[in-house]
Amino acid sequence: MITIENVSKSFTLHNQGAAEIPVMQGASLNVAAGECVALVGASGAGKSTLMRMIYGNYLTASGRIMVGNVDVATAAPRDIIALRRHTLGYVSQFLRVVPRVSTLDVVAEPLLVTGTPKQDAQARAKELLARLNIPERLWSLSPTTFSGGEQQRVNIARGFAYPYPALLLDEPTASLDPTNRATVLAMVKEAKQRGAAIIGIFHDHAARDEICERQLDVTQYTPGLAA
Ligand SMILES: Nc1ncnc2c1ncn2[C@@H]1O[C@H](COP(=O)(O)OP(=O)(O)OP(=O)(O)O)[C@@H](O)[C@H]1O
């Protein structure tokens, strides 16, 4: 489902005379449907950089990043938008939302934009919010003032609302209590069972070992960065 082949990248430091810093060379990875692979390596090794390249936030200098039948490395922006809508979900570490949109609408949105009728989208959003213990009195409010853990759970609910065939997870259990952490791990396992291909970053090693089949140490592709 996700195939990364011989990917390389440099950062351009615009405030330092456009200096080019090579950060990644020869990165390769294959993630099948129903499989979870953890990106590992010391802090600063390049895990988030690789994840941002897969999502299309960072440009790739060479190589291929196939997600389904789209090569993210060369796709046009509108193809990346379509890919993010129907194929590739991303649960980032922090919730970024438009102010004044209710929590229920934030979670239902990925379903609405893919054509799910409003009532069904809201029913699914309510089910996820309840499962992740977001009190019902908060559903009509914007999540911008929620606690860190509440925002993370809203983010997870949104990321799991639509059944994406491929999912990127950046520290999905980082600020959760044991009960919600267990719920999130169960949701990841369910996503794998329905055939999602998952790539994750987990400082929570017990969570990583519970849900991932394999690990990829990115340090081998980023020799200049390793801490
Ligand atoms: N846009 C950028 N421009 C220049 N350097 C960058 C940019 N983004 C990341 N870097 C650098 O690339 C290196 C890898 O960063 P990255 O965030 O991928 O590491 P990581 O393995 O995810 O670390 P952590 O576990 O601490 O989150 C770091 O040294 C970082 O400062």
Image (cartoon, rainbow, N blue to C red):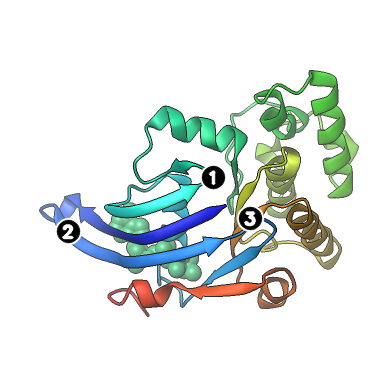
Name the kind of residue labelled 3 in the image: Ala
Q: Neighbour class for label 1 at 10 Å: few (<14), some, many (≥20)?
A: some
Could you tell me if the residues under marks 3 and 1 are in contact, i.e. CB atoms within 8 Å? no
What residue is shown with label 1?
68
Where does ligand 1 appear, by image quarter?
Answer: bottom left
Q: Picture quarter containing residue 105?
A: top right
Secondary structure under badge 3? strand
Which is more foreground, mark 3 or mark 1?
A: 1
Q: Is mark 1 within 8 Å of ligand 1?
A: no
Query: Residue visible at 42% across and 51% down?
Result: 65
Query: Residue visible at 37% across and 52% down?
Result: 64
Name which of mark 3 and mark 2 comes first in the sequence.
2
Coordinates of residue 149 in the picture (x, y in percent): 72, 54
What residue is shown with label 3?
197
Name the kind of residue labelled 1 in the image: Gly
Coordinates of residue 124 in the picture (x, y in percent): 84, 34
Could you tell me if the residues under marks 2 and 1 are in contact, i.e. CB atoms within 8 Å? no
Coordinates of residue 57 in the picture (x, y in percent): 41, 45
Numbered mark located on residue 20 in the image: 2
